[in-house]
Structures are given as structure tokens and as C-alpha cells.
Image (cartoon, grey):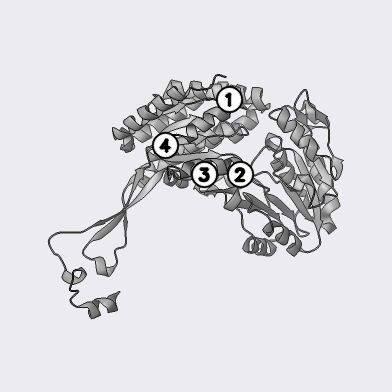
């Protein structure tokens, strides 16, 4: 795919700044109309999008619809249902010393946004932030991942068929284009990717004091205690680890399991994987592939330490790695030093929950944390750890609730989105005090008459 040139990028950015300056995007009716147009376009291009996801990642139609298409259309529906209310100025309490003034918060669009998406959910992770930008009244420049070229082309076709480029446009390319984009001045940058690239984006944004939303990743722990329902835990962990062949930023990255239930859990995770994908997983119509050769080689290197107790098969020609459970893993092994981002599940036992809590807290704050066990112990784990989000007795499902904020903390990201949080992410919350002129109280003016009385009030 040909890289978008610097001239095209600059011309598009200037056109979007001019269009934003026309104030058209501030109209709630304009925004609602374009959200409806966007949803209709997704329906129109659905087959093209799902075919592209199959070509790039071997995603079945069912998985593509559930994890990419439906999350975006549900997000649109949520914004359509609430946008008028979100957009209205919000009256807030005014303290007595400011009376008879009134106070309100006005939500106004930040301006022209840059949205950069990764390759693992190349449609959803570009289009979902776009819903927030449209809802807030921003213009947007979209940058799909070059590692999923079929999806990148499908996205460009959808956007060009739906929006004028001066409002919403697409640029294509790799690192060179990313560098060109980082040199421009946007009003907000929304980036989804790795923590290392997030630091690059934040350094570039600092040159213009551009606000950023960084949706990153990390090693999300999964803890299974002896009080857990092992049958349910195994099935839900197997599902969370095999969706998109483990190439999910909130996938269970590693498994801490109480020693008394470790063997049973590991066996049942393997059984659950087989029940979902069959004895020959390579032939499963519902098991995706690794994105490219570079990722294949990296994952193969991570499989060298520990003892493989399930899976382990690799086919470089097909970019296939079987779901693989690895036992006898040590803290110092490479697989425990970086986010796996693949279908490998290292397993480590614990005897006391404090061991698992201590390990989590000794490392970077994760994007998600999963705990399987009794409610009382779950409350303790939540109270003594932190993460961007998570689930009790499940995996991944917190991302599907548009009433919950989604985002990281520390090394796993900053800023949240989904639902109202997406609207807020692309908005400036403007604080306004409205003072009448029919009275002008003298207390704030020198020489500060009645100061002692005012001091008591304050």
C-alpha cells in the first residue's frame, strides 16, 4: 500500500482545521446525522470488512462480528441515545460567596483529532474512538495499521464513501507516515498500541502540548484461587486466551493458580480449548492466525523456556501457533518479561494469595486483572492491587459494557473511553460562571469591607 505523502497530510489537516472553524460540527443535529450515517455505512460495508479481517487475521465472520463490528455499532447506538443530554450545558452548584451568580459546564469539541489504531483489532480500535470524536463534534484524521492491509483498504473505502475528507479522512503507511503525523499539530491524539510506542507519541505530543489518550497494554494477570469454580474458570480463561489467537491487549497474559487446584485447572483449560476448536485446532474455522512472520518468530522464542503441557504446534507457512499452556515457568524467563500477545499461557503456582498480589504489585500496572474465587477474597485482591479494569470470575467482558470506562493506568495507558467517557475524551469541559449586573456586591473589591464577616463564610 502506498504511503500517504507529507503534502496530502498537511493539506488534509489544513482542510479539517478550516472545516472545524466553520462551527458546523458543533451542531448536535449535525453530529447525530453523521453518527447515523456512520452506522449505515458499517452495515453497507460489513461483508467487505469481515472478508478483510479473514484475509489479514483469519478471523471468522462470527468472531469478526462479535469483537469488531458489533462493539462499534453498539457504541454508536449508545451515543445516539444520550448525545443530546451529554451536549447540554450542565448546571452545577454555586457556593454562597458567588451568589447571585450561576455556574455551568459546557462540553465543546477539542478540534481536529488524530486516531492511530493497532493491527490486532484493526477495525474496532480505529472506529470506536471515531464514534467519540463524531459525538463530541471533532474532525478526525484516521491512521489504520499497515500490518493489516486488507482492513486498512476496507476502512478507507468506508470512510471515503461516507464522509468528506475535510471532516473525516484516512492516511496510510508505516513508520515514516507516523513520524510525519507526529510532527503536525493536532488538538488531541488518540493512540492504541504498545507502551514503547505510546512513549514516542507522548514525546511528540509534548512539543505542541497536545492532549493524548493512550490505550496501551502490558501483562494482565489471571489469578485462580482454591475457592474458584474450576470448570467455569477453565472455560472462560480458555476463551479469553484464544480469542484472536491471544492477540488481545486485555487477554490473560499469565496464570497464577493455587497449587491445590493447579493440575485440575490446567487439564480443564486444555479440554475447554479442544471442545471449542476440535482435536485438530489448525482446521478450526474459528481459530485466527498470527499477524506476520516477525510476530511468529518472537512468540516461538518465548516458548523455549518452561515445559509445554498442552499445544506447542507451529506452522510458519500458515502463521499458526496452537494454544499453548506452559508449566514450570520461572519469574526470570523471557515469557514473563514482556507482553505475550499470542496464544501462550505460562502457569505459576502459589500457596498464599499474598504471593500473587506481591508479584502483581512488583511489576508495571496492568491493563486488566482477572480473579477467580470467592467474593470475599476477590475484594481483598482488588483492594490490594490496581489495574485499568478487570473481571471477577470472568475474562475480557468488562470491555463490552459501554457504561464502564475502558483504559489503562501507569504503564498500561492514560485516559478512558467507551460510552460517555468517549464523548468526554474528545471534549473540553469548559467552566463558566454567569454573573448578573443588577447587583455588584463590594466584598471582592479593595479595601475589602466586611472582611471578617466574609472570612467566616469562607
Name the residue nearer the viewer: 423 or 395: 423
Q: Earlier in the sequence, mark 3 or mark 2?
A: 2
Q: CA distance from mark 2 to mark 1?
A: 23 Å
Task: State the residue lying farthest toward the left.
Answer: 438
Where in the figure is residue 357, as x and y percent of width and height? 71, 61
Q: Earlier in the sequence, mark 4 or mark 1?
A: 1
Residue 442 seen: yes
Q: Nearer the viewer, mark 4 or mark 1?
A: 4
Kindly identify which residue carries mark 1.
151
Residue 384 vs 31, above or below: the answer is below
Q: CA distance from mark 4 to mark 3?
A: 13 Å
The residue located at (30%, 33%) in the rendering is: 24
Residue 257 vs 2, above or below: the answer is below
Q: Are marks 4 and 3 in contact (CB under 8 Å)?
A: no
The residue located at (72%, 30%) in the rendering is: 294
User: Where, quadrant-wise, is the N terminus in this rendering?
Assistant: top right
Q: CA distance from mark 3 to mark 1?
A: 26 Å
Q: CA distance from mark 2 to mark 4?
A: 22 Å
> Which circle marks residue 202 in the picture?
3
Q: Earlier in the sequence, mark 2 or mark 1?
A: 1
Residue 419 seen: no
> Which circle marks residue 195 in the picture?
2
Q: Earlier in the sequence, mark 2 or mark 4?
A: 4
Amino acid at each position: 500500500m502506498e504511503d500517504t505523502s507529507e503534502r496530502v497530510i498537511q493539506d488534509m489537516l489544513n482542510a479539517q482545521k478550516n472545516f472545524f472553524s466553520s462551527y458546523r460540527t458543533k451542531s448536535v443535529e449535525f453530529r447525530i446525522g453523521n453518527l447515523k450515517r456512520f452506522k449505515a455505512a458499517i452495515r453497507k460495508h460489513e461483508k467487505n470488512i469481515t472478508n478483510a479481517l479473514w484475509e489479514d487475521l483469519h478471523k471468522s465472520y462470527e468472531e469478526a462480528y462479535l469483537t469488531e463490528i458489533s462493539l462499534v455499532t453498539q457504541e454508536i447506538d449508545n451515543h445516539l441515545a444520550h448525545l443530546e443530554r451529554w451536549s447540554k450545558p450542565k448546571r452545577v452548584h454555586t457556593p454562597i460567596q458567588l451568589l447571585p451568580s450561576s455556574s455551568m459546564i459546557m462540553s465543546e469539541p477539542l478540534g481536529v483529532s488524530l486516531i492511530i489504531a493497532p493491527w490486532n483489532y484493526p477495525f474496532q480500535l480505529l472506529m470506536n474512538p471515531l464514534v467519540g470524536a463524531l459525538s463530541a463534534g471533532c474532525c478526525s484524521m484516521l491512521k489504520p495499521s499497515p500490518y493489516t492491509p486488507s482492513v486498512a483498504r476496507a476502512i478507507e473505502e468506508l470512510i471515503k464513501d461516507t464522509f468528506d475528507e475535510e471532516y473525516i479522512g484516512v492516511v496510510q503507511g508505516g513508520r515514516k507516515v507516523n513520524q510525519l503525523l507526529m510532527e503536525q499539530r493536532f488538538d488531541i491524539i488518540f493512540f492504541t498500541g504498545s507502551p514503547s510506542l505510546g512513549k514516542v507519541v507522548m514525546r511528540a505530543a509534548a512539543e505542541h502540548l497536545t492532549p493524548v489518550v493512550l490505550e496501551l497494554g502490558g501483562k494482565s494477570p489471571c489469578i485462580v484461587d482454591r475457592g474458584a469454580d474450576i470448570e467455569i474458570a477453565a472455560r472462560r480463561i480458555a476463551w479469553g486466551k484464544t480469542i484472536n489467537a491471544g492477540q488481545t491487549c486485555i487477554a490473560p497474559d499469565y496464570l497464577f493458580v493455587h497449587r491445590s487446584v493447579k493440575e485440575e485447572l490446567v487439564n480443564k483449560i486444555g479440554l475447554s480449548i479442544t471442545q471449542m476448536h476440535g482435536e485438530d485446532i489448525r482446521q478450526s474455522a474459528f481459530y485466527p492466525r498470527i499477524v506476520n512472520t516477525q510476530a511468529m518468530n518472537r512468540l516461538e522464542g518465548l516458548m523455549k523456556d518452561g515445559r509445554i503441557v498442552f499445544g506447542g504446534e507451529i506452522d510458519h507457512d500458515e502463521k499458526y501457533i496452537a494454544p499453548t499452556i506452559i508449566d514450570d515457568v520461572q519469574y526470570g524467563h523471557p515469557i514473563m518479561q514482556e507482553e505475550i500477545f499470542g496464544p501462550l499461557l505460562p502457569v505459576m503456582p502459589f500457596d498464599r494469595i499474598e504471593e500473587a498480589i506481591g508479584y502483581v504489585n512488583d511489576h508495571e500496572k496492568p491493563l486488566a486483572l482477572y480473579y477467580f474465587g470467592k467474593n470475599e477474597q476477590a475484594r481483598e485482591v482488588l483492594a490490594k492491587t490496581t489495574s485499568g479494569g478487570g473481571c471477577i470470575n470472568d475474562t475480557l467482558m468488562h470491555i463490552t459494557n459501554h457504561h464502564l470506562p475502558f483504559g489503562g493506568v501507569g504503564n498500561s495507558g492514560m485516559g478512558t473511553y467507551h460510552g460517555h467517557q468517549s464523548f468526554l475524551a474528545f471534549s473540553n469541559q469548559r467552566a463558566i460562571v454567569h454573573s448578573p449586573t443588577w447587583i455588584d456586591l463590594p466584598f471582592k473589591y479593595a479595601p475589602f469591607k466586611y472582611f471578617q464577616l466574609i472570612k467566616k463564610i469562607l
